[in-house]
Amino acid sequence: MARDIHALISQMTLEEKASLCSGSDFWHTQPIERLGIPAVMFADGPHGLRKQGDGRDDHLGLNESIEAVCFPAACALASSFDPELAKKLGSTLGQECQAEGLGVLLGPAVNIKRSPLCGRNFEYLSEDPFLTGKIAAAYIDGVQSWDVGTSIKHFAANNQEYRRMNCSSEVDERTLREIYLPAFEEAVKASQPQTIMCSYNKINGVYSADNEWLLSKVLREEWGFEGYVVTDWGAVNNRVQGVRAGLDLEMPSSGGVNDAKIVAAIKNGTLDEALLDQTVERILKVVFSYVDHRHPEATFDRDADHEKAVEMETECAVLLENNGALPLKAGAKVAYIGGFALTPRYQGGGSSHINASKVISALQSAQVKRRNVIYTEGFPSDRDEIDPDAFCAAVDAAREAEAAVVFAGLPDIVEGESYDRVNMKLPACQDRLIAAIAAVQPNTIVVLHNGSPVECPWAEDVAAVLEMYLGGQGVGEACDRLLWGEANPCGRLAETFPLRVEDNPSFLNFPGDGKKVKYAEGVFIGYRYYDTKKMPVRWAFGHGLSYTQFEYRDLWLSSDKMDDEGTVQVNVVVSNTGPIDGKEVVQLYISDKTGCTSRPTKELKGFAKVALRSGETKTVTLEITARDLSWYNEDIDDWYAASGKYEVLVGHASDDIQLSGELQFTTNKIPPMIIDGSTTLSELMDNPKTAAALSQILRTTFGSAATENATSTESKDATEQATIFAMPLKTLANFAAMGEEQYQEMLNGLRSALHQGSINH
Ligand code: BGC
């Protein structure tokens, strides 16, 4: 029987309603016993359960939580390019939550990787909003399939840790709409997360927690969000303005202080009680959606879920380089070097930190499987320090083996929640040892454990590089499978590895001065920038190798024309032409050829991960819509694609396009034209409605012959023509010595020509 939440609210006192607007403690919502409203518990997320109890609560992962399974962190998850896998992860976590009595899991975290230096990038998915949105939506579907809520976070423009609690992200609306909001938009529209967590920071001077434009206009009115907005822990600014703006729940508890402010504001008439009722209704809907749908059959089987963690990480790891050294040959004598072989780094620090149920290292895995592996530490995994004896022993071991695997990575202290990285380098001791080993051992393989790109100065000197990211507690076993060919790598980079951090487009404006950070690079972030500037990078967005090969042929579109309402299917034939089974990630990018505005060379608008047996061929179909061609046009406050030509590019990676097709797009959306003194003659000539009227004005002012010469497409003097057409009406009036009356007459004449038969005013 459905709950009558309205009836429940009508029985509440004002104080009771206000009390529901903040937590009862660090991790629970407020109960009201007399009305049968229970407390519901939260836990972090996103890649495992951080369920804390007995009063030892914190939002930085400082105190122990229950033993749980640590799955691949988001940096790895996104590299799977596999929404099905994200859904499976979500569903595993959803079941674990039901078994543990958790009503809302705090994740996924979908902030876009603006700079490789953001300390929390390991917890975020990608530099690309399209990929981020698809993975996030699937994760939410998975968790919520168990009637457990998610809290997609941190809404919005929280792309650094430095001064994250007060800094203002200064971003223009087009950039917000195209880069920093679409993952939230996709998740809300496709999967309705039960809650959304607003970020600590300000956006263009307004705290997210107070931001009516963000929390009400965009999130609810435009996207149709039905759940409640919760603060990031401690992110409330002005509690009463928060209610007005659309902020529902404050976490953790304010000890009643802020609830009293809500009550006072209603009593003194500065806050409408109807807004409070709405907030309470949203919170209760989510509370009861959990309470009324408990799953007594749910279990938290740590061993079974550990196996899932291993399988998932196997699908996430990215093979970045391979000259044939991988997979390792059965029986080969291999030197394992580096502390991470023994104690892998598999998660980042902060609120997502999991008390992992078990961790089996790559070295242990190799030993269990009786591989011919010898281990030497070479360098410590927790600091940058060279011990000359350990260094030489590692070089000797590498020289004497048939291959050397260096387990490199970032120490915990280098990246984590609350602080950013200061550079993009591995500890110098690691770079030096890798270079020394590569000099004596041609089969040198580097395995990386990091949450964000690192500079790899030795990349061209080693035989192979395998990026494991922060792969969760299954990382060691997954690594073993991939190194020795028991599994075929199939991850793809969800972010660019630039050659140097200075190449990153945000470099000059990251992390700002503590008060403000300017997103001056606009929409040109990640591959959108490197690609458009034709800059070399270490490894491009979408890149990833396999132990088999794939071939593309026969790209065809269901139609080569499209309009605002239409969709087009893009088909391509992909074959596995290599010796073993594998998975290819087919990627579709759109390139705007209309020249209408400044846009990235290409943007990801579709992808599919396809399993292909050796010798197998499949046809892959991806769909595109007008939105996929569009940019956010602030003049019309809407998505807009100009009429004209678009290229559809399909291939292995952003830097490895195999096939392309062409699409002719026609739109009915005509950006409104405002005619005033700054309107140029060329704008008026480009618009069929004003072109004739302008020619007439020019003829009257300058005479027919001169006008003919200036407007004719055959005009000999291109420079003169360009100069004339660049002129705004104000300047034309000056040259023609028009009086004020004549000038106004000209403007009015052009305006009425524009509006004749037009619906756009
Ligand atoms: C983090 C959130 C987290 C919350 C609760 C905050 O500091 O930013 O991501 O969910 O703490 O631990």
Image (tube, rainbow, N blue to C red):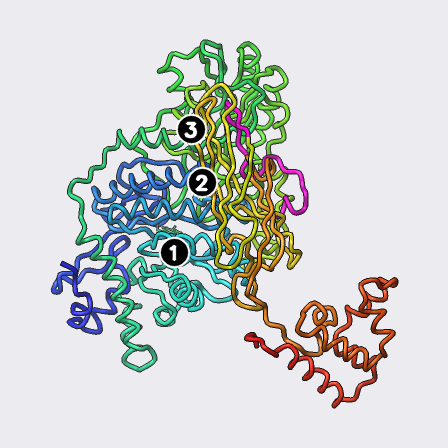
**The CB of the residue at mark 3 lies under 8 Å from ligand 1:** no
Q: Which residue is mark 3?
A: 344
Mark 2 or mark 3, whichever is nearer to me: 2
Establish if 301 lies above or below 503.
Answer: above
Q: Amino acid at mark 1?
A: Lys
Q: Nearer the viewer, residue 11 or 27?
A: 11
Is 709 positioned to the left or the right of 271 in the image? Answer: right
Q: Residues within 10 Å of mark 1 (few under 14, many from 20)?
A: some
Q: Main secondary structure of the magenta part?
A: loop
Badge 2 element = helix
Q: Identify the residue shown where x is 34% and y is 41%.
A: 87
Mark 1 or mark 3, whichever is nearer to me: 1
Asked if residue 537 is among those painted magenta in the image, a careful observer would answer yes
Q: Nearer the viewer, residue 72 or 715?
A: 715
Badge 3 element = loop
Residue 516 showing in the rendered view: no
**The CB of the residue at mark 1 lies under 8 Å from ligand 1:** no
Mark 2 and mark 3 lie on one chain; the one further toward the N terminus is 2
Q: In the displayed image of the protein, which residue is found farthest to the left? A: 34
Establish if 224 lies above or below 388.
Answer: below
Q: Amino acid at mark 3?
A: Pro
Image location of residue 6, percent across then percent down? 19, 69
Cα distance, mark 2 to mark 3?
A: 20 Å
Q: Which residue is mark 1?
A: 189
Badge 1 element = helix
Mark 2 or mark 1, whichever is nearer to me: 1
Cα distance, mark 1 to mark 3?
A: 38 Å
Boundaries of the magenta span: 528-551
Q: Which residue is mark 2?
A: 78
Q: Residues within 10 Å of mark 2 (few under 14, many from 20)?
A: many
Q: Residues within 10 Å of mark 3 (few under 14, many from 20)?
A: many
Establish if 111 lies above or below 263.
Answer: above
